[in-house]
Image: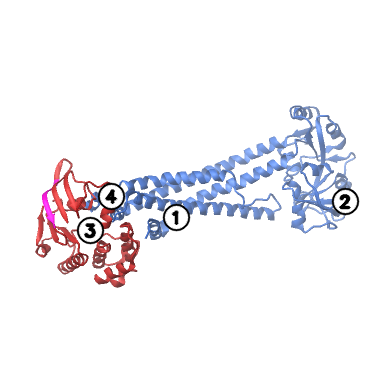
Chain colours: A blue, B red
Amino acid sequence: MRILHLAFAYLASRPLLTALNVAMLALGVATISFLLVVTHQAEERLTRDAKSVDLVVGAKGSPLQLILSTVFHADVPTGNIGLEESRPIAANPMVASATPVALGDSFHGHRIVGTDESFLALYDARIAQGRMFAAEMEAIVGADVARREGLAVGAKLTGAHGLAASGPAHGDHPYQVVGVLAPTGTVADRLVITSVESVWHVHEEHAPARPEITALLLRYRTPLAAAMLPRAINATTAMQAASPAYESARLLDLVGVGVETLQWFAIVLMASAALSLFVALNSALQERRYDLALLRTLGARPAALAALTLAEGVTLLLAGAILGFALGHGAAHALGWWLAEAASWPVTGLAWAPGEAVLAAAVLAIGALTCLVPAWQAYFSDPASLLARR
Amino acid sequence: MLEIRGLRHDYAGRTVLSVPSWDVAKGDASLVLGPSGSGKTTLLNAIAGLATPTAGSIRVAGREVTGLAPAARDAFRARHVGLVLQTLHLIGVVSVRENLRLAQRLAGSPVDDARIDEVLASLGIAGLGGARAGNISVGEAQRVAIARAVVNRPSLILADEPTSALDDANCAKALALLLDQAAACGATLLVATHDNRIRGRFERRLEL
């Protein structure tokens, strides 16, 4: 029987306490791991989707809503702007590219975006099958849309008003799929892309006298534009300019408060687990101080007794940490599965977040501190006085 | 086998053990007698290298125990000394066999199940190897404690109050087993006790 086997035997001799300690530690690790994985992937996604667009020009209203609706395609637009009013902005020498977007409909929850060829350049998207739309009521679909809806070149799809799959359908205006995009890892994967004219065509009975679009997605030619254009647009036109980088950072800050609260909760949970581990190890040490004294009489070195106590603590710690990471990633994967059902952002539990290395190190450090005190006590226990006292 | 010279142990400013001189020959069985608190356990601990006396010399099989470094003392005890404690203490969460294997491993010997079976059989508990040590009776634990003390064929067996908690019948049995096993390994046996029932079984005695 080796020291490690003896440590396992001690743990197995009190299964309920062992399981409780592992479960407490695992819950703390799982909560933090889940939050790290999900927030990291959300941040990465927001950053990736927002990085191609420097400025969005749209109708006045909430700038966050404007960005959410026209860049992340996760909200209803603030309204429309006149195509003619937007032309001077597109022609501004500080603007490198101006991509119009006309929104309003969706297909099974996937937003239908009326735009032009420059939209694909924003996301480095290329056509994997078929060709670019050329005529009215032709559309290309993102890779996720094609996969999830089983669409290929030649298929037809009908849009419904709004973002919800259950909105009123435009059954008399079907789109013809003429191309499928290669996966980009961006929001473009989840969109149906057509011409602005097609969107106008679908809504022609409600069309205003002057053509409108939802927004213009701008890329700057010069960094100076970031200082001048938004202020100029907001001050001198009836439109508003919003920065995706700024608004997504603001969104992450807003969400971050909740995430931070949950993280603190998880940290308290982990601290409780560490305390519980300490109490368990300490009481185990008290319970078996005669075992330790006996082992000394049989020739065990003090370091072996410390190793025995450490082995127990480290076993609990590793079991809790491994189970915690597995639970955290499992929960993230389950969330990803659920979100995929809702045609929303993809989340996977199969990827690690950078913060998890810090989490693992913190768990080990806390665990080591927790185990060291009992191990130290075991090391310095005096078998002669213990046996004499009994 | 055992030579003690000028041994003294002080605790909290007073002398709790004093043995001016005592010799025990190889294979002898000797009794250390004295009331509670007379220093019997301290003497056994000092001989086993578990306690360092304040002054004096203890030689076991020609080696000065008090002069050994802690690690060497632990190794010496594991290889040459078998201890039977008053409380019989076994590691309750593992089997009887594992208790004996543990004693073999800690002595630096390879696990020898044949030796374990031999010892268990000679103590009349051949079928007890697989039993969880925490679940056996006091009488069985007594025998297992003796088995553990002799499994490594020590040259010196130290027994601390091995019979004080037993009734007359079991006291006689335990003592007989202890003497038989010591004789079987050719070991020197030292029994520390305040139990007057067993003094007649030993010719050599040290009164504290």
Residue at image mark 3: B85
Would you say the residues marked 3 and 1 are in contact, meaning their CB atoms lie under 8 Å apart? Answer: no
Q: Is residue A240 magenta?
A: no
Horizontal side of B101 relative to A119 (left or right) equals: left
In x, y percent, where is residue A265? 52, 44
- Expressed as whole percent of the image width and height from the top left, the position of residue A304 reads 35, 51
Q: Pointer 1: what residue?
A: A20
**Is A28 situated left or right of B7 in this image?**
right
Q: What is the spatial separation of the Cα atoms under label 2 and label 3, in whole angstroms?
A: 94 Å
Element type at mark 1 = helix
- Say whether residue A273 is left or right of residue B178: right
Which quadrant does the C terminus of chain A fall into?
A: bottom left
Camera-side mark, 2 or 3: 3
Marks 3 and 1 sit apart, C-alpha to C-alpha, by 35 Å
Query: As rendered, which of B155 and A367 lies closer to the eye?
Result: B155
Name the residue that disc number 2 marks: A137
